[in-house]
Structures are given as structure tokens and as C-alpha cells.
Image (cartoon, rainbow, N blue to C red):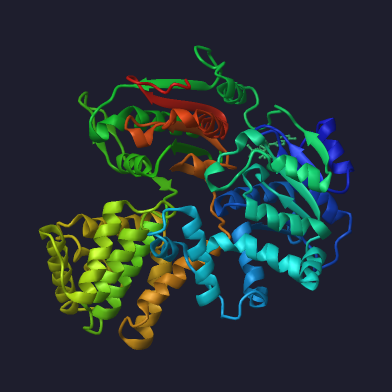
């Protein structure tokens, strides 16, 4: 089914550690899966042994799984484990973490972690607190997974033997984005297992979380792999200039050149939602093109440089617009790969109101604590602003002393009091959806920004598709107890479990996501859109222009057949 170049055939013919390099769409993932197939079919594995394919994100895993279904037959897939670093390392920590810490280990879920660590803006202080939480409370932050596992494997010979016997061959995807802790873990894995590393130095877009241009060299020095380079072989967008454009972006050669199936659109700046009209028209046309081609499972990605822009674009697609010339732009059904922290903490706050409201025990202090958690943690990995930190500190102070300064802050207390009183007077029915909405609506009358933000984040839960999981966990509680006692904990657990579930999501239809989320994926058509405000630009800092080039190259090369890039007419992107 796949025609293999000589270089690719050699990958199949070579044993030992391998480093497979190549540009976007050159076929690294495909050859790695074919290599796994070959190993499994050769009968070299015993029943309990697996080839392990490790990647960073659940969303990438689903594409690899989809791809594996095409490349491998079902019986072979049983001996292939496709997993994320997080999920794989957490499994090891759950079973063997007691060797490192006498406390019962408990996961510190990402949304809770962001709130707990909000005050530490310096990396060293944050790291110290993460280690303290582990040592004194047994709480394991995600950032500790890889380093703790590296420690475990270096300490316990029997554990490292079990792992290498279970996984004699390990494939490492997107290796260029490996951080120091993951590298330490990989170094331990590689002592007894064969490593097949897939990398493209110029797809490195995670420098901010520790990816290092020296990493590929470190792998070569430590493991002396046989090296393969597929260069610019292009299997994804053959017959187009998409990869050429991506490569030229790195040097600036793309300027004023024409490329087949790559189009730059310079749009006029307009106010509000009108700014996205041209984008929406482009999406509608792309849908029509793909439908005309009768493509099964066609996919379009709209890639944005920031989360806020992603939500604004999603909002525009969600609505029907009537243009001045009478044309109607319909609502476009789409999926949004939204950041989870804000909606998750908002969900816990609402679940707590439901829990306490159902037994008439809502209280102001608990609501203030949950509100502070949201204020501090809703931006996920990004620290909260100084104002938010100060606000949260003064609300906590009020919870302790009953004192608060400033009218705006007093208004928050008054509005929270109102919410608590109304929640204690609500009639709960056990119909989870309507109980949830009734409680969420209690936040609607508030004028304080921080409460409005909770309401807004709670509405984004819809985009996370958490409805059914929340419905079933709360529904079960009501059936058992006739109230919602335990709802907040159940919601926390449900959201955490979701994080580890290996996603089987397929990227069909229209998908809206940030450029970073698009890494490792592919779509029939890609539309990239930069806004006009500072936080929405491709090049947001001239000092980081090289990183911007890498990011844009990754975005552009996700397309199989067509890429469109939108930039404002005034002050257009300097890379185009
Ligand atoms: N030898 C081949 N013949 C035909 N199609 C191929 C071949 N190798 C890969 N492809 C197809 O090309 C596309 C890109 O392949 P693949 O995902 O393996 O590339 P990649 O190098 O891992 O890409 P990236 O680094 O951008 O994630 C896929 O749709 C795949 O099915």
C-alpha cells in the first residue's frame, strides 16, 4: 500500500537504535508504524510484549491510532501500545511511586495545580513548591512525572527490567520537543530497550517548556543510533508547494513568491465579529470544495496564535450572519480544542454549589475559596495577573477576618452572598442538566468580572464535551442519595480521568485550535488566521522571530491539499 524509498526500506532492514529525521509529512510516523508491524510480524515478541509508541499529546495519539488502523491489521495492533508520556509515566508512578515517597501518592490535577502554584512566578520557586507538595503531601504534579520515573528506573533495576521486557522497542514521536526531564526518563528507558526516535529539528515549537536544540545531538552521542534522513520527501501534500513554502518561511525566501495551493489573504480590520467575515467565507468555500470532492471524513483546521482569538472565531462560526448584500452566512458546526483549566475549575465551583445547595448548606466562605481557585488557576500554565493575585488574597483575607477594602471587592462579597442565599432556596429535582443550568444561571446577574468569568468558562464546558460525563457522575449520586453530596469531588475525578483517557477523537469536519495544538496532526485544508491585537500576532516579539517562523511552518504544513493564511492589511505579518 505504501511505496517505500530506498532510505525507508533501509529503516526496515536496520536493527538497534534508530534516529529517523525528515521534514513535515515526509513519512516518519508511517515508517515507524511499519517498523512496529515488521517487529510484531517477525514473531520476535512474546504474548505480553509490546512495541511502545510514546507521544506528547492525547490529540496526537488519536491521529497516530487512526493512522495505525490503516497501516496495521487488528491482530498486530494488539501488540502495539500507543500512549502519552503522561499516561505511561503516571501508570508507573501509581504502582511504584511508594519507592520514592512514604506518603500515599495522589495526583495534583492540572486545574488544581494552576491555582495552588499561582503565586510563584519564578520557575525555581514554583519547582521548589512542586517538590514540597510531593515530599510533604504526596501530591504529584504533572511536571514531576518524567523526572520521578527517571529516578525510579535508575534506582530499581528490577523495575527497569520489567519495563524493558514488556517494551523491548520504544518509538519516540516528536523527539525535538523533548524537555530535560523527559530526556532523563528516555535515557533510562534506552539502557535496556531499543529506541526509535522520530524528529524534525525545525518542527521544534515547545522551547518554552524546555525543548532544546541540542537534544537530537544528545541522543546521537548517548545512543549512537543509525541515522536516516527523509529530507524534504513529501507524502502529505504531494503536488503542492505547501512544504516548499514552509521551508522557505525559515529563510524568508517566501516573500513576494507564488506557491501552488498556498494563499495569503490581507484582510481589512473591522470591529468585533465583522473582522472574521472573510475567514468565515473561506471556511464555507473550503467545506464546499471538500464536499464536492466527495471526500470521506474530510477535515479543515482553523489555526490561531492565541486562545482568546480561538474563542472569538468559534463564536463567529457559531452564529448566523446576514451581510449587507443580503447573503446569509450560516452557522458552521465545528469543534474547538479549548484549554481546560478555566472551564474545569468553573465546573467544580458549580458542582460545589449544587452539592451544598441540595442540602441547603451553601456557605459564603466555600464559594469565596472556589472563586479564588478560579481567579488564580483559570489561565492554566500561565500565571495569573498581579491584580488577580491581589484580588484573590483579599477574598481569602475576608474569609478569615470578615474585612475587605474597596467598593468593587465589597460588591463581589455581596454578590457571592446573594448567590449563596438563592442557591439554598433552589428546588433541586435530580434532573442533572436542569439543576446544573439553574445553578449556573445564579451567576448571571452578577456584575463583578470574576464571577462573570466563571459563568463564561462554565459555558465553555460545552466545547469540552464534558456534558455526558458530568451528567452520569452527578446523576448516579442523586439516584443513590437523593441529594448531590460528593458532587464536587465526583466532578474533579471525572475531569481528571478524562485527562488520561486515550482519546479516540477523529479530526473530521471543521476544527478550531491554537497552532501549538495542531502539532503532529494533518488536515485536508488549513486556514491560519492572525488577529490585529498584540497577543494575537504570529510575531509577537521581534526577539522571538525564529520561533515564530518554526510555529508558522508547523501550522502551514499540517495541510494535505490547501493552506490559506490571513493577516491584517495594515501592519501585516513580517514573515509573509
Ligand atoms: N510511503 C508513503 N506512501 C504514501 N503515503 C505516505 C507514505 N508515507 C507517508 N504517507 C502519508 O503521508 C502523510 C504524512 O505521513 P506521516 O504522518 O508519516 O509524516 P510525518 O513525517 O510523521 O509528518 P509530521 O512530522 O509532519 O507529523 C500521511 O497521510 C501518510 O499516510
Residue closest to the eye, 446 or 238: 446
Image spot of residue 341 (x, y percent): 40, 58
Callout count: 0
Q: Furthest residue to the bottom?
A: 481
Image spot of residue 24 (x, y percent): 64, 33
Q: Is residue 512 above or below residue 412?
A: above
The answer to whether any part of residue 508 appears in the image is: no
Q: Residue at x 48, y 65 (%)?
A: 129
The answer to whether residue 24 is left or right of residue 515 is right
Image spot of residue 260 (x, y percent): 56, 18
Residue closest to the eye, 93 or 442: 93
Image spot of residue 78 (x, y percent): 74, 61
Quadrant where the N terminus is found in the figure: top right
Q: Residue at x 12, y 67 (%)?
A: 414
Q: Which quadrant of the figure has residue 454?
A: bottom left
Q: Which residue is drawn at 64% across and 22% down?
A: 239
The quadrant of the picture showing ligand 1 is: top right
Q: Furthest residue to the left?
A: 407
Residue closest to the eye, 266 or 315: 266
Q: Furthest residue to the top?
A: 256
The answer to whether any part of residue 523 appears in the image is: yes
The answer to whether residue 498 is left or right of residue 424 is right
Q: Is residue 387 above or below residue 295?
A: below
Residue closest to the eye, 479 or 536: 536
Amino acid at each position: 500500500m505504501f511505496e517505500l524509498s530506498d532510505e525507508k526500506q533501509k529503516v526496515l532492514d536496520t536493527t538497534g537504535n534508530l534516529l529517523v529525521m525528515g521534514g513535515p509529512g515526509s513519512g516518519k510516523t508511517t515508517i515507524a508504524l511499519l517498523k512496529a508491524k515488521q517487529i510484531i510480524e517477525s514473531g520476535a515478541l512474546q504474548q505480553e510484549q509490546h512495541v511502545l509508541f510514546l507521544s506528547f499529546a492525547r490529540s496526537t495519539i488519536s491521529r497516530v491510532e487512526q493512522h495505525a488502523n490503516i497501516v496495521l491489521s487488528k491482530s498486530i495492533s494488539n501488540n502495539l501500545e500507543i500512549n502519552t508520556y503522561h499516561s505511561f509515566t503516571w501508570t508507573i508512578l501509581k504502582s511504584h511511586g511508594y519507592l520514592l515517597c512514604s506518603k500515599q501518592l495522589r495526583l495534583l490535577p492540572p486545574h488544581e495545580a494552576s491555582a495552588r502554584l499561582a503565586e510563584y512566578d519564578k520557575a525555581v520557586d514554583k519547582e521548589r513548591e512542586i517538590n514540597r507538595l510531593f515530599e510533604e503531601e504526596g501530591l504529584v504534579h504533572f511536571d514531576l512525572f518524567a523526572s520521578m520515573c527517571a529516578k525510579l528506573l535508575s534506582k530499581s533495576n528490577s523495575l527497569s527490567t520489567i519495563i524493558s521486557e514488556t517494551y523491548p522497542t520504544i518509538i519516540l514521536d516528536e523527539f525535538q520537543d523533548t524537555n530535560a526531564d523527559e530526556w532523563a526518563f528516555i535515557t533510562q528507558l534506552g539502557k535496556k530497550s531499543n529506541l526509535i526516535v522520530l524528529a524534525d529539528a525545525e518542527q521544534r515549537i515547545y522551547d518554552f517548556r524546555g525543548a532544546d536544540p541540542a537534544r537530537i545531538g544528545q541522543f546521537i552521542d548517548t545512543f549512537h543510533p543509525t541515522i536516516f534522513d527523509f529530507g524534504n520527501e513529501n507524502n502529505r501534500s504531494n503536488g503542492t508547494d505547501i512544504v516548499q513554502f514552509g521551508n522557505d518561511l525559515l529563510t524568508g525566501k517566501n516573500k513576494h513568491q507564488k506557491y501552488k495551493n498556498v494563499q495569503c489573504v490581507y484582510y481589512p480590520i473591522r470591529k468585533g465579529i465583522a473582522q472574521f467575515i472573510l475567514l468565515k467565507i473561506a471556511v464555507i468555500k473550503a467545506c464546499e470544495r471538500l464536499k464536492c470532492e466527495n471526500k470521506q471524513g474530510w477535515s479543515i483546521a482553523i489555526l490561531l496564535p492565541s486562545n482568546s482569538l480561538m474563542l472569538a472565531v468559534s463564536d463567529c462560526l457559531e452564529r448566523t450572519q446576514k451581510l449587507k448584500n443580503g447573503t446569509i452566512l450560516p452557522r458552521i458546526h465545528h469543534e474547538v480544542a479549548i484549554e481546560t483549566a478555566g472551564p474545569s475549575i468553573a465546573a467544580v465551583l458549580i458542582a460545589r454549589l449544587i452539592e451544598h445547595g441540595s442540602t441547603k448548606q451553601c456557605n459564603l466562605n466555600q464559594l469565596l475559596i472556589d472563586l479564588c481557585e478560579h481567579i488564580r488557576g483559570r489561565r492554566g500554565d500561565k500565571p495569573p495577573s498581579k491584580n488577580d493575585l491581589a484580588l484573590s488574597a483579599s477574598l481569602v483575607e475576608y474569609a478569615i477576618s470578615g474585612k475587605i477594602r474597596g467598593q468593587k471587592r465589597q460588591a463581589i462579597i455581596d454578590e457571592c452572598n446573594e448567590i449563596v442565599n438563592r442557591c439554598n432556596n433552589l428546588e433541586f429535582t435530580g434532573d442533572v442538566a436542569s439543576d446544573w443550568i439553574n445553578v449556573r444561571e445564579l451567576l448571571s446577574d452578577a456584575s463583578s468580572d470574576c464571577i462573570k468569568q466563571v459563568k463564561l468558562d462554565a459555558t465553555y464546558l460545552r466545547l469540552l464535551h464534558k456534558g455526558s460525563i458530568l451528567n452520569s457522575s452527578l446523576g448516579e449520586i442523586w439516584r443513590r442519595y437523593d441529594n448531590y453530596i460528593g458532587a464536587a469531588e465526583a466532578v474533579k475525578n471525572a475531569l481528571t480521568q478524562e485527562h488520561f483517557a486515550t482519546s479516540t477523537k477523529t479530526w473530521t469536519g471543521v476544527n478550531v485550535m491554537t497552532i501549538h495544538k495542531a502539532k503532529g496532526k494533518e488536515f485536508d485544508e488549513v486556514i491560519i488566521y492572525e488577529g490585529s491585537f498584540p497577543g494575537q500576532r504570529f510575531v509577537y516579539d521581534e526577539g522571538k522571530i525564529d520561533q515564530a517562523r518554526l510555529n508558522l511552518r508547523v501550522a502551514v504544513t499540517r495541510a494535505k491539499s490547501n493552506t490559506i493564511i490571513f493577516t491584517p492589511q495594515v501592519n501585516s505579518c513580517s514573515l509573509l
